[in-house]
Image (cartoon, rainbow, N blue to C red):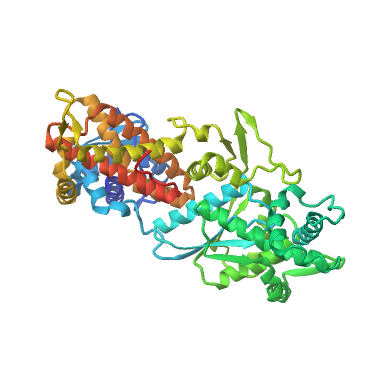
Amino acid sequence: MIRERLASLVEKAIDSASKDGKLGPLTSCPVPVTIERPRSLEHGDLAVGIALKLAGPAKMSPLKIAEVVAEYIEKDAEASSANIARLAVAPPGFINFHLGSGWLELALQEIHKEGENFGRLNIGEGKRVLVEYVSANPTGDLHIGHGRGAVYGSCLSNLLDFVGFNVEQEFYVNDAGEQIAQLGFCSWALYQRLLGRDVPYPEEGYPEISLKHFLEPLVAQEGDKYMHLDAEEGPKTLGALTKVVIMNSQRDLLARLGVNFNTWFSETSLHTSGAVTSVLEEFSKREMSFELEGALWLKAKELGDERDRVLRKSTGNTTYLAADAAYHLNKYKRGFDQLVTIWGSDHHGQVPGLKASVKALDLDPDKLEIILTQLVNLQRDGQMVRMSKRAGTVVTLEEVMDEVGVDATRYYLAESNPQNPINFDVELAKKSSKENPAFYIQYAHARCCAILRRALEEQVNQETGKQDPPVLTQAQIDEYKKEYVANAEVFRAAFEPDHEVFLHQKALVQKLDAFPDEVREAAVTRLPGRLARYAYELANDMQKFYEVSRVITDDLSVTKARLGLILATQQVLANTLKVIGVSAPERM
């Protein structure tokens, strides 16, 4: 990977110049080196702006620092391995790298060598990470907001696995508390109503229409089996039955979305096992809680929170914080190296309390990372689509998936940063055009596959009208693939001498070679959506290449080389789509 080689050269040059006293008080490179693509290819193939970051520590101008670093790079005997044709220093402190064509060939060879592992890194070094996400109440359908958390958590888990972490995924089932009691009352009333008993439905309950499709199959299966229950047992029994039906429905829908969990952790189990009581006792033993007016409070202010937090109400009922503290203590005890908790933005008020509880239990706060996902605004024909669970007009996740498809749903929920709201245009997500990134990326992958098929199929001779034999046989393709791995020079014939055409060809290879760097940045910043946007840019570069470069030609050496480039593009697109959980179709 050319960027890694260049970054290593730059860091080495800074270290050497520092030791020689050429960079003021610096003794080594104090910050990571990032190699970037210039805005204009006229400035070079790649560039580094590290001098801008070193100006303060070195007490020198960025331009002077860049000149010193460039001088040391040019003196380095290893510079030739990075295929640097020439260096250029540009204000205010950039070093621009103009590379020889040999690096393009080496970049393509690397992709063919690594195949489906191209882009994989070992940042995680096998460390165990628990990613908890979705964690919806089992009281109704999942909506598109839940879908965003599901897709983000799934993509992040895939990404962390791709960079070497041992990832486990967990759904925390919020099956305790007032909302479950309310589900029981609503389910019991609806069950009786469906069987003809004239009983009122709770006015402040969950929308009757939302629960009906869960209860109807239950009634069809069980009939009036529970009609004899009294007002106390009826809600308990029907609530428990309905909860299971809803959980199974949520599980099936998420699996269809490509979201699967290693563990479904029940909040109720924390209460029945005594874990909640135990954590309250632990707070007391550590003198991190106090009683006031019959309630038990966490001394959260002492731990950086803006106010103290209630753990147990004066009624004796425990709060969400008490259960969350017990749950996260359980996570820590399971021995994970890192804990990632993904919540919707409506839970932002709970974050300070949870962080305070972790500190109060003397757990390592650096192990816990809480990420909030913002809202999803559904649009149709430019108009907002309302989402109101209480009004019974919720647009469910299933409805969106049915209308636009699983792949489009995942792509549009994955591409944005979690801290930004999403405007999900349902009509755009159904288009078969470049306007729809999900379609455009998949189409680029399918086109790569089609080009390969075309080389293997008989062609109609336009002059004679007869069938010509295939340009290539499968045996030849198999031999080519071996040669792509063994000999980088085979790709030399892929590139045109024409400057404008060559720029498009080079841009495609640059984008392919950048994939591992994109993966690294996405993993470090916890932004898997970066790869969704990268895939769109790669598809665009592939389309520009296709428009100016014939792949199947009369010259077999050119055909061989360009097929290698197409196969490399197909591989990187497939690798990218796999991380974000979108399919890579061979035909469209």
Closer to the camera in the image, 307 or 475: 475
Q: Residue 511, image x and y in percent?
A: 32, 39
Q: Residue 51, image x and y in percent?
A: 36, 40
Q: Residue 218, image x and y in percent?
A: 70, 60
Vertical comparison of 315 with 532: above or below = below
Q: Quadrant of residue 557?
A: top left
Closer to the camera in the image, 29 or 41: 41
**From where the camera sits, is residue 318 visible?**
no
In the image, 134: left or right of 506? Answer: right
Number of numbered tags placed on the structure image? 0
Vertical comparison of 468 with 306: above or below = above
Residue at 57% of width from left, 44% of height from top?
419
Q: Quadrant of residue 513?
A: top left
Residue at 72% of width from left, 56% of height from top?
215
The C terminus sits in image quarter: top left
In the image, 132: left or right of 532? Answer: right
**From where the camera sits, is residue 585 visible?**
yes
